[in-house]
Image (spheres, rainbow, N blue to C red):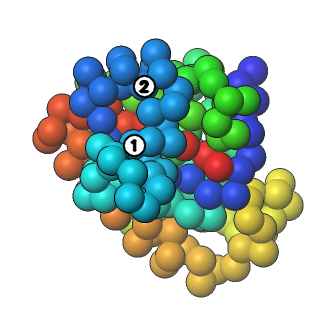
Amino acid sequence: MMVLIMGVEVSLFQVSLSQLKKIKCDFNLIDKWFFPDEGVDSDYNEEHSFYLGRSFHGLHFMLSRTYEPKPDGSLKDFFVFGKHKLCFEKEIGADCAYLLPQEVKDLLKMLCNVKRSRLSLKFNPDEMNRIKIYPGRWCLSDFDVLYELFLQLRKYYRDAAARDNAVINIVY
């Protein structure tokens, strides 16, 4: 079973396949590229990042109906958390995973088929509060916020697919 490090926030970052290979070999690039200090040379590009913030867990649950992704789950279960682990959480203090470029494209196809009406039927704030979907205190008005975030995320994956990029997720 996959164990998630439940952080407070989630950010996604698009990278080329060659950049992903470099990151897999050098965990220091996570800080350098994605969380640069002012005045430090960095490959960070704001247009290639997407901040999910604290709503990531609610969005994941609304789409997948699972608390966390199951290792053998559908690709759509990994749109927030990534499918392939980058194994240096201790070194950087964050949980990192990624989707490969073809997985990004396949996921986009799935996300493009998701309709508002279907999502609204899956949104259940009472159940989300009962099973402690982060950050908790869900109410009916949160659906609109999550749906807007979903639309932005789908657009982000569309851009990543068009660029043939992988997507790294960082839970911190």
Residue contact between numbered discs 1 and 2, judged by CB atoms under 8 Å: yes
Whether residue 62 is visible here, answered yes or no, is no
Position of residue 27 measured from the top left corner of the image (x, y, whole percent): 53, 27
For label 2, the residue is: 23
Instruction: Choose between 139 and 3: the one closer to the eye.
Output: 3
Q: Quadrant of the N terminus?
A: top right
Residue 53 lies in quadrant: bottom right
38 displayed left or right of 95 = left
- Give the mark nearer the N terminus: 1 vs 2: 2
Q: Amino acid at mark 1?
A: Trp
**Residue shown at 36% from the left, 18% from the top:** 21
Residue 51 seen in the current view: yes
Question: Is 165 situated left or right of 72 in this image?
Answer: left
Q: Residue furthest front?
A: 39
Q: Amino acid at mark 2?
A: Ile
User: Can you say whether 83 is above or below 58 in the image?
Assistant: above
Q: Which residue is mark 1?
A: 33
